[in-house]
Image (cartoon, rainbow, N blue to C red):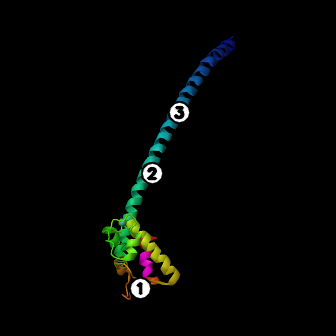
C-alpha cells in the first residue's frame, strides 16, 4: 500500500519535474542567446577598435620611421620639388616654344614634364642632351653644357 502511494507520488511528480526541466531549458537557451549576442557584440567592437587603432599606428609608425631615418642619416637627400613646378618658367628658347602647347608663353608643369621626358628619351638613346633650355641648367652638375646619363637620373626621378 505504502509502495503504491510512493510510486503514485513519483508518477505525479514526473510531469512537474519535466515541466521544470523544459522551463530551465528555455531559460538556459535564452541565456545562451544573450551570451552569444554579447560575445558577438564585443568581438565586433574589438574588431572596429582594432581597425581604427591599426590605422593610427600606421600613420604614427610612418612618421616615426621618417623621423628615425632623418635622425640616422641627416645627409640623406630630401625629396625636393623642382623649381619648374613651384614657378612656371617663361618660354625663352625655340625648344621651349615647341612644348608650349597652349601658346601662353609659359611652360606649365604638364608641358615641362613632356619636354623633360623627351629629353630623357634622347639621353637614353644618345647618351647626352645639349642644354637648350634654362630648365635643364640645374641638372647639369658638372657644368659642361650637356646632361649626361648620370645627371639624368635626378631628372628621371622627377618626371618618370
Ligand atoms: Ca603653356
Ligand atoms: Ca653635364
Q: Earlier in the sequence, mark 1 or mark 2?
A: 2
- Label 1 residue near ligand 2, CB within 8 Å: yes
Q: Are marks 3 and 2 in contact (CB under 8 Å)?
A: no
Q: CA distance from mark 3 to mark 1?
A: 78 Å
Question: Residue placed at 64% from the left, 17% from the top?
Answer: 10
Q: CA distance from mark 1 to mark 2?
A: 53 Å
Position of residue 119 measured from the top left corner of the image (x, y, whole percent)? 45, 77
Q: Along the horizontal axis of the image, is 69 left or right of 16?
A: left
Question: Residue placed at 41% from the left, 85% from the top?
Answer: 146
Tell me which segment is drawn in magenta.
Answer: 151-155
Position of residue 40 measured from the top left corner of the image (x, y, whole percent)? 50, 40
Which residue is denoted by mark 3 in the rendering?
A: 33
Which quadrant holds residue 97? Answer: bottom left
Frontmost residue, 108 versus 16: 108
Frontmost residue, 134 versus 65: 134
Disc 3 on helix, strand or loop?
Answer: helix
Position of residue 89 measured from the top left corner of the image (x, y, whole percent)? 32, 71
Which residue is denoted by mark 2 in the rendering?
A: 51
Q: Is residue 94 above or below residue 4?
A: below
Quadrant occupied by the N terminus: top right
Frontmost residue, 84 versus 104: 104
Q: Nearer the viewer, mark 3 or mark 1?
A: 1
Which residue is denoted by mark 1 in the rendering?
A: 146
Q: Which mark is residue 8?
A: none
Look at the image and say whether residue 154 sits in the magenta stretch: yes
Amino acid at each position: 500500500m505504502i509502495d503504491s502511494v510512493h510510486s503514485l507520488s513519483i508518477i505525479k511528480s514526473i510531469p512537474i519535474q519535466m515541466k521544470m526541466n523544459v522551463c530551465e531549458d528555455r531559460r538556459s537557451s535564452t541565456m545562451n542567446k544573450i551570451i552569444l549576442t554579447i560575445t558577438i557584440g564585443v568581438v565586433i567592437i574589438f574588431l572596429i577598435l582594432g581597425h581604427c587603432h591599426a590605422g593610427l599606428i600606421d600613420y604614427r609608425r610612418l612618421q616615426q620611421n621618417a623621423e628615425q631615418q632623418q635622425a640616422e642619416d641627416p645627409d640623406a637627400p630630401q625629396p625636393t620639388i623642382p623649381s619648374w613646378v613651384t614657378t612656371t618658367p617663361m618660354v625663352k628658347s625655340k625648344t621651349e616654344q615647341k612644348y608650349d602647347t597652349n601658346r601662353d608663353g609659359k611652360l606649365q608643369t604638364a608641358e615641362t614634364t613632356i619636354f623633360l621626358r623627351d629629353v630623357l628619351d634622347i639621353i637614353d638613346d644618345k647618351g647626352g642632351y645639349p642644354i637648350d633650355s634654362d630648365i635643364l641648367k640645374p641638372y647639369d652638375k658638372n657644368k659642361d653644357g650637356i646632361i649626361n646619363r648620370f645627371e639624368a637620373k635626378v631628372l628621371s626621378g622627377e618626371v618618370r
